[in-house]
Amino acid sequence: MAKQTVNQSLSSEDLTNIDDLSKKSAQLDALMYMTYGEGGEVFRRSSDKVQENYLWACAEIASEVRALSEKLALA
């Protein structure tokens, strides 16, 4: 059976949001990678303040990813 495709043109704002979502997701992935496994050893040896600020940055990026995802879902 042939696969159906939807011909939907994306606005420049949608394309920008997709690009931003991709960038933010990659950044968050890289940051979170440093919290477990071998990278996590350095993280766990860091001071409580450094860990708190690091995870705060991760949470901020996660919020941005969520907001971008919601924008795209409504588009």
Image (cartoon, helix red, strand yellow):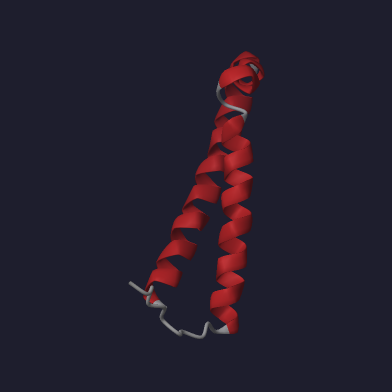
Asked whether residue 47 appears in the rendered view, the answer is no
Residue at 37% across, 75% down: 2
For the residue pair 49 and 20, the one nearer the viewer reads as: 20
- Seen in the picture, residue 19 relative to 39 is either above or below; the reply is below
Q: Quadrant of residue 47?
A: top right
Q: Quadrant of residue 38?
A: top right
Q: Position of residue 13 (x, y in %)?
A: 57, 79
Asked whether residue 34 appears in the rendered view, the answer is yes
Residue at 66% across, 18% down: 42
For the residue pair 62 and 18, the one nearer the viewer reads as: 18
Q: Quadrant of residue 69?
A: bottom left
Left or right, 50 with reference to 71: right
Q: Position of residue 25 (x, y in %)?
A: 56, 51
- Seen in the picture, residue 32 relative to 39 is either above or below; the reply is below
Looking at the image, the residue that sits furthest to the left is 1
Residue at 41% across, 81% down: 6
Residue at 55% across, 41% down: 58
- Seen in the picture, residue 41 relative to 27 is either above or below; the reply is above
Q: Position of residue 64 (x, y in %)?
A: 52, 57
For the residue pair 65 and 18, the one nearer the viewer reads as: 18
